[in-house]
Image (cartoon, helix red, strand yellow):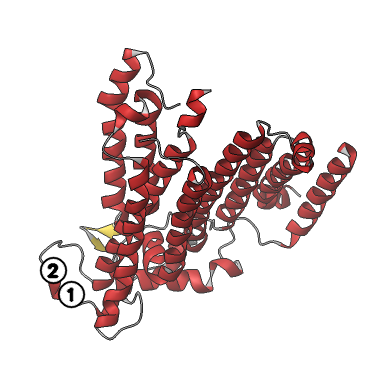
Amino acid sequence: MIDEIAARFPYWASGLLIAIGLYGMIGKRSLVKKLIGMNIFQSAIILFFIAGSLRHGATLPILLRKDGHIIEPIAPELYVNPLPHVLMLTAIVVSVAITGVALAFLVRIYREYEDLDEESLLKKVRQ
Amino acid sequence: MTERHDSIILHFVVRVFMVPFIVMFGAYVFIHGELSPGGGFQAGAIVASAFVLARLTLGTNHSSPRIQAHYLIWLASFGVGIYVLAGLIPMFFGANFLDYNSLPTEWFNDIAEHHRTARAMGLFIVEVGVFIAVFSVLVTMYDHLTFQHREEQDD
Amino acid sequence: MKWLTLAFLISFLGLFIYVSADLPDRGDPHAPGNTHLAAEFIELTGEEIEIPNIVSAILADFRAHDTLGETIVIFTAGLAVLLVLQVGYKRND
């Protein structure tokens, strides 16, 4: 039982963070809080992938060197899985880009309507 | 956020300690990115954070007047252009797009000793393009999000 | 409405924990995602590219087309911010 929990808790933690992000996107009325919820959601996905890349008994994905030369032969089981790190590195940059564009939209909406609350904004748009 | 902050201690600390150190650390992360954790994306974000810090405390007009918001997007397209050029050059040597293996190695054997293979050198050129693009896009996003229009200043 | 949101989130979390029983154990060296392609990338980095940082090698060489798309995405995001905030206003300088 305790082994089962120890093998699963990073997944559960990122699931909890996904739920918090979804609550921010669904349950809050302010558009800024929706954006913060989306950021939490993206961070949870990133943590999920990074937790999945771990291997027990492995070190970080930099090849070990001796006197400036890579040690041959290379043992793949000595390093954690580098592929999720690469994918999440690009995902972080995409999340920054999404946040910037979303903030630009929010600034533009606030200049037009002077309001960022969802329901009163919908009323003002429909008028 | 675009005005100059009043505290002179803040100015001193930011100008003398924070910004030079962050820029130097970003340069280290970029240049050392093939031997240790780092690379174009991370170094671009670090150097952009130094510029944003200078804009937050010293004011946009005082921090770096030569780098204006309207010209940074040209720099970003320059970075993307470096990347695309690094992909196009191998095509002149009869290889595929972004296949650095066909680059003649004797070009850059003298430049750096630890760049032994052509693929490592092509990788470095690509990282330069990514660094320029990420840095200038992040700074241009901050500049445009805090840009004060004349119409708004009047009323 | 609030209770509906809460019920949705709790059911989502329950489903997530139920499904996570099928995921591989944390740190399992023989998990499917950790074996085939990752081992090949690590070996090829040492043999063909000869730089120590595997993440940089995958980012800018093996998956170079992906990173090219990524760079164009952030460039487009910067362009979008510029267009959304500047169109319809006069220049200030």
Q: Which chain carries label 2?
A: B
Vertical relation: B138 (above or below) B35: above
Please name the amino acid that badge 1 sits on.
Thr
| Rendering quarter of residue A76 | bottom left
Q: Residues within 10 Å of mark 1 (few under 14, many from 20)?
A: some
Q: Mark 1 points at which residue?
A: B105
Left or right, residue B116 beside residue A122: left
Viewer-proximal residue, B152 or A89? B152
Is there any visible trace of residue B42 in the rendered image? no
Furthest-bottom residue in this view: B94
Left or right, residue A53 beside residue A20: left
Please name the amino acid that badge 2 sits on.
Asn
Q: Mark 2 points at which residue?
A: B109
| Rendering quarter of residue A36 | top right
Kindly identify the residue that appears in the image at 89 percent across and 43 percent down: C4
Numbered circle sitting on residue B17 = none
Furthest-left residue in this view: B110
Q: What element carries label 2?
A: loop
Kindly identify the residue that appears in the image at 28 percent across and 18 percent down: B12
Kindly identify the residue that appears in the image at 28 percent across and 68 percent down: B122
Left or right, residue B121 beside residue A21: left
